[in-house]
Amino acid sequence: MDQQTRLELEAAAFRRLLQHLDSRKDVQNIDMMNLTGFCRNCLSRWYQEAAQSMGLAMDKEAAREVVYGMPYAAWKEKYQAEANATQLADFEQNKPAD
């Protein structure tokens, strides 16, 4: 497989991941973190880091808007639920060490 085809496939898979996450707004970031070790915020941070590594200026909010499909504050207000005690306890036990 040539490099261009690989890049196109990776880009298509990333777009599909964003579509899937957009269709599953019911899945909370804390649940994603507890099950997979990453969430939408992680994905947006990785996107921002990739942009910056290519010399592109991108702040956290711009990267989050790519991943969330809207400003993060609007998504959070509309879709984010308060974490329950079990979710918080699981997160404390499994959170990444940054």
Image: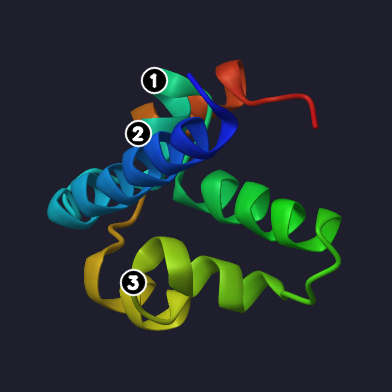
Q: Residue at x 16, y 50 (%)?
A: 26
Q: Is residue 96 left or right of residue 76?
A: right
Determine contact: label 3, label 2, CB under 8 Å: no
Question: Badge 1, how many Cα within 10 Å: few under 14, some, many 20+?
Answer: few
The residue under label 1 is 35
Q: Earlier in the sequence, mark 3 or mark 1?
A: 1
Residue 31 is labelled as 2
Q: Tell how many labels.
A: 3
Position of residue 44 measured from the top left corner of the image (x, y, whole percent): 56, 56
Specify the color scheme: rainbow
Label 3, secondary structure: give it.
Answer: loop
Residue depicted at 53% across the width and 46% down the height: 43
Crowd band around label 3 with a 10 angstrom C-alpha radius: few (<14), some (14–19), many (20+): some
What amino acid is labelled 1 in the image? Leu
Instruction: Identify the mark at residue 77; answer none if there is no mark.
Output: none
The disc labelled 2 sits on which kind of residue? Asp
Rendering coords of residue 67 (x, y %) = 43, 61
Quarter of the rendering containing residue 79: bottom left
- The residue indicated by pointer 3 is 69
Q: Does residue 13 sit above or below 79 in this rendering? A: above
Name the side, left or right, on which 63 lies relative to 60.
Answer: left
Is the Cβ of the residue at disc 2 closer than 8 Å to that at disc 1? yes
**Amino acid on which disc 3 is placed:** Gly
Question: SS of the residue at dot 1?
Answer: helix
Could you tell me residue 4's position as x and y percent? Answer: 53, 39
